[in-house]
């Protein structure tokens, strides 16, 4: 691996002024996914704008706290953190169930993840996640969120015609990819947030009839502390669905921590990894208690560090503090809440394309002799996940209540299918299970 030319290394502490500047750069990178995932989940749960804003406030707070803790006491690496898209799959598939069952499952999933990491058992589970399984999981997240994206870019109650929305989405996405092709450095790293701002302004100018500013009571600030989700309700089907999602989250977390550790040649990576995954589990427990989506370490950091030459973990401290501060500024969250769903959906398409690209890159780089059987192992889970994700609601409604969160969740069915294909049907000879 080529040696990095770093201005500030992992344990270096830049001067206060530069610390703030670098922290703001990370902040600009962290905010988009919090906006996108937070707004999507808030809309799934609540029709009331005030409740949606409270939800997004809490997501900002949990992510900010996660960044702060991980950098100082967790893996101690310059990793950006955000809402886990794989948990969004589980939340979307659990619509119609008591919201308490969803966040009880997130709390329990976080507890089990922390327990597995602290006990060392997680190391044994890693054997299940071969390159073909990881590739499938990365791609499944993108494909199984397709129905939700369709609902975002084609909202039911809107004065804008479906054709107009579709043409806007296609044009907007094309512009985003053109910008991605030619922008460099931090301009490229902050492309999503700048694209969302510009896209929102253009959409409002083109379709002013679709824009209704949200007006929210100032009591939103106080409600942050009152609306905690403390009711613990277990639904076995929902819980199993989320535990499978947590397997994918754990692999995502592991990959992000190890990739940045390898890039920076960090010492004692075994302990860093264990602490990082343990804290991810504990912070997901907090998310469950607060009733918001859990967090995960993102794999965006290597590209940012390579472009800036700044690898100091301390530059993320202002980022964590800034995210927590935003959680207690309702006007800022109200501004976020006014971003059109069509723009949110378009940005999500770009993000999930990156997810699928990461899966394809891993697949082709790890399987040098790509064979027909490899295609079958990857193909069946993807096909099943797409079929399940687009099943008519009337058909899913006929499933037994306990099985609906499992058999009605395309991601869960896809993960089960790839594990069966990889470790049973097409298991390599002399390969341990």
Image (spheres, rainbow, N blue to C red):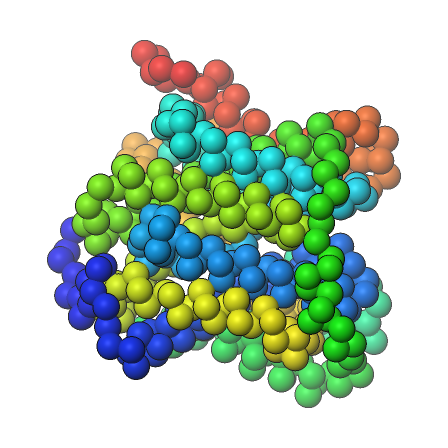
Q: Quadrant of residue 394?
A: top right
Residue at 64% x, 64% y is 56
x and y percent of residue 372 in the render?
A: 42, 28
Q: Quadrant of residue 141?
A: top right
Nearest the eye: 173 or 224: 224
x and y percent of residue 129 in the render?
A: 42, 30
Residue at 21% x, 49% y is 266
Nearest the eye: 5 or 138: 5
Q: Is residue 8 left or right of residue 260?
A: left
Residue at 45% x, 23% y is 422
x and y percent of residue 68 in the render?
A: 42, 59
Q: Is residue 398 left or right of residue 165?
A: right
Q: Is residue 245 left or right of residue 251?
A: right
Question: Is 315 situated above or below 128?
Answer: below
Q: Is residue 26 left or right of residue 229?
A: left
Question: Is 393 situated above or below 43?
Answer: above
Q: Is residue 186 visible?
A: no
């Amino acid at each position: 691996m080529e040696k990095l030319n770093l201005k500030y290394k992992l344990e270096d502490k830049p001067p206060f002024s530069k610390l703030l500047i670098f922290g703001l750069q990370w902040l600009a990178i962290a905010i988009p996914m919090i906006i996108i995932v937070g707004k999507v989940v808030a809309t799934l749960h609540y029709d009331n704008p005030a409740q949606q804003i409270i939800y997004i406030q809490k997501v900002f707070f949990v992510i900010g706290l996660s960044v702060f803790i991980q950098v100082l006491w967790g893996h101690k690496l310059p990793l950006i953190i955000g809402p886990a898209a794989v948990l969004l799959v589980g939340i979307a598939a659990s619509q119609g169930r008591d919201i308490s069952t969803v966040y009880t499952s997130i709390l329990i999933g976080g507890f089990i993840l922390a327990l597995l990491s602290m006990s060392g058992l997680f190391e044994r589970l890693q054997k299940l996640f071969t390159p073909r399984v990881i590739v499938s999981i990365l791609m499944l997240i993108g494909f199984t969120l397709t129905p939700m994206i369709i609902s975002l870019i084609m909202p039911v109650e809107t004065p804008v015609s479906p054709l107009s929305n579709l043409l806007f989405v296609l044009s907007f996405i094309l512009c985003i990819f053109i910008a991605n092709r030619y922008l460099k450095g931090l301009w490229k790293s902050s492309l999503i947030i700048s694209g969302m701002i510009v896209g929102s302004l253009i959409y409002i100018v083109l379709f002013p009839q679709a824009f209704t500013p949200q007006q929210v009571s100032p009591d939103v600030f106080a409600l942050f502390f009152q609306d905690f989700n403390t009711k613990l309700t277990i639904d076995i089907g929902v819980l199993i669905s989320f535990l499978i999602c947590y397997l994918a989250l754990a692999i995502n977390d592991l990959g992000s921590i190890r990739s940045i550790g390898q890039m920076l040649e960090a010492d004692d990576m075994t302990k860093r990894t264990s602490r990082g995954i343990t804290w991810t589990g504990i912070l997901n427990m907090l998310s469950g208690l607060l009733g918001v989506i859990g967090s995960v370490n993102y794999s965006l950091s290597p590209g940012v560090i390579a472009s800036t030459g700044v690898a100091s973990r301390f530059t993320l401290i202002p980022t964590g503090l800034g995210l927590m501060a935003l959680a207690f500024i309702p006007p800022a969250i109200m501004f976020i809440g006014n971003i059109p769903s069509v723009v949110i959906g378009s940005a999500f398409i770009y993000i999930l394309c990156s997810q699928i690209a990461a899966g394809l890159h891993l697949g082709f780089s790890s399987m040098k002799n790509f064979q027909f059987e490899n295609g079958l192992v990857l193909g069946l889970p993807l096909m099943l996940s797409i079929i399940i994700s687009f099943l008519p609601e009337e058909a899913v409604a006929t499933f037994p209540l306990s099985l609906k969160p499992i058999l009605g969740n395309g991601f869960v069915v896809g993960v089960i299918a790839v594990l069966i294909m990889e470790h049973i049907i097409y298991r390599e000879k002399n390969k341990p299970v």
